[in-house]
């Protein structure tokens, strides 16, 4: 029990060394909300403007849609963006900034919210655009990630068992999280970190500096087994799902011998692991990551 608790404290503290998360008071958490990320057909994409939520609507930069094989053009005089699908059945959508009306192949359709501009980028309601262009959208609230998939896309489960653990773990975090229980529902914070059992990519602990989610991957689905918030007296302050206490067997492989990847507030990453002699090791990236999956850094050893 004590060994598991010690490992839990180290993991929530983001590894074996000090980290900014331990200096952030609970009252300051709201200042570090996570920006929404976008995953298209199993791959996170690079963005200069992130999706935004406004009045219960999620808006995505039109430029992001290029990853779906779409093209777009901007008419500055009319403040109109034209989005076009290049599939066999071409779809042409015209959206005017500030208007709730979109024209799809010349037919007007009402949107729940008008398109808007942020930092020089046109943002459109993601569900309306993706569904009218034939793509599926799934917004995962646990990590604040938008998943877009084409009809023909299917996750390749074999990538999770490949020898390249970095690639396998990148694939693992690229699956949307599912849960069959009522989740804790705290807002997603910016200090994301992932803890994997050594040598494995089929389960992990996700922590955003406040809420922890235990994830198991089976049959190509990432299922949340339980959630908890670490308490002030070496216990759980909140729990949800199939998790009881610190001695729960599902926690053991996550804390006995693990690898921890974290994203810092400045966009860099820190990686923690133990070497073959059991010595704690740490290294950090010098530059900000380009895409979300770059949180998973390559280790000097295959662990």
Image: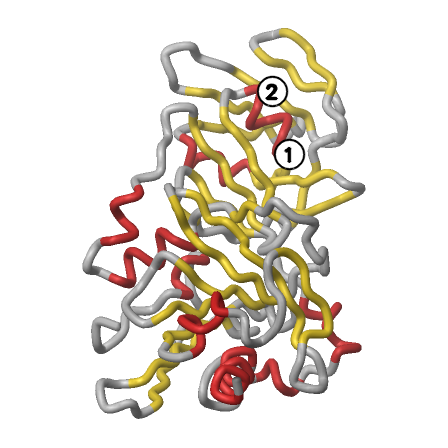
Secondary structure beneath dot 1 equals strand
Point out residue 266 in the picture as x, y percentages from the top left corner: 53, 74
**Callout 1 environment at 10 Å: few (<14), some (14 to 19), or many (20+)?**
many
CA separation, marks 2 and 1?
Answer: 11 Å
Q: Residue at x 39, y 19 (%)?
A: 86
- Mark 2 or mark 1, earlier in chain: 2
Q: Is residue 120 visible?
A: no
- Reading the image, the residue beneath label 2 is 94
**Callout 2 environment at 10 Å: few (<14), some (14 to 19), or many (20+)?**
many
Q: Residue at x 26, y 62 (%)?
A: 165
Point out residue 23 in the picture as x, y percentages from the top left corner: 65, 87
Residue in front for this viewpoint, 73 or 240: 240
Q: Residue at x 36, y 56 (%)?
A: 202
Secondary structure beneath dot 2 equals strand
**Relative to 191, 69 lies left or right:** left
**Relative to 207, 84 lies left or right:** left
Would you place residue 267 above or below residue 18 in this image? above
Residue in front for this viewpoint, 18 or 200: 200
Would you place residue 6 above or below residue 67 in this image? below
Would you place residue 64 above or below residue 196 in this image? above
Residue 117 quadrant? top right
- Reading the image, the residue beneath label 1 is 124
Residue 252 quadrant? bottom left
């Amino acid at each position: 029990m004590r060994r598991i608790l010690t490992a839990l404290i180290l993991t929530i503290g983001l590894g074996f060394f000090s980290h900014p998360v331990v200096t952030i008071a609970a009252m300051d958490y709201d200042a570090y909300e996570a920006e929404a990320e976008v995953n298209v057909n199993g791959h996170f994409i690079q963005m200069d403007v992130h999706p935004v939520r406004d009045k219960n609507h999620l808006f995505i930069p039109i430029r992001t849609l290029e990853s779906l094989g779409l093209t777009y053009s901007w008419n500055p005089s009319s403040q109109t963006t034209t989005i076009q699908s290049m599939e066999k059945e071409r779809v042409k959508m015209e959206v005017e900034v500030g208007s709730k009306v979109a024209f799809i192949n010349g037919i007007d359709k009402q949107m729940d919210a008008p398109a808007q501009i942020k930092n020089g980028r046109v943002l459109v309601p993601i569900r309306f655009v993706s569904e009218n262009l034939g793509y599926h959208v799934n917004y995962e609230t646990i990590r604040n990630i938008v998943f877009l998939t084409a009809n023909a896309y299917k996750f390749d489960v074999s990538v999770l068992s490949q020898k390249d653990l970095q690639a396998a773990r990148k694939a693992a975090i690229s699956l949307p999280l599912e849960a069959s229980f009522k989740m804790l529902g705290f807002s997603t914070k910016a200090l994301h970190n992932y803890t994997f059992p050594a040598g494995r990519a089929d389960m992990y602990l996700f922590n955003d500096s406040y809420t922890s989610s235990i994830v198991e991957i089976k049959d190509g689905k990432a299922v949340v087994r339980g959630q908890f918030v670490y308490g002030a007296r070496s216990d759980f302050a909140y729990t949800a799902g199939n998790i009881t206490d610190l001695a729960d067997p599902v926690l053991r492989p996550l804390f006995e011998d693990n690898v921890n990847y974290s994203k810092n507030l400045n966009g860099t990453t820190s990686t923690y692991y133990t070497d073959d002699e059991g010595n704690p090791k740490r290294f950090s990236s010098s530059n900000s990551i380009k895409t979300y999956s770059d949180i998973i850094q390559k280790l000097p050893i295959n662990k």
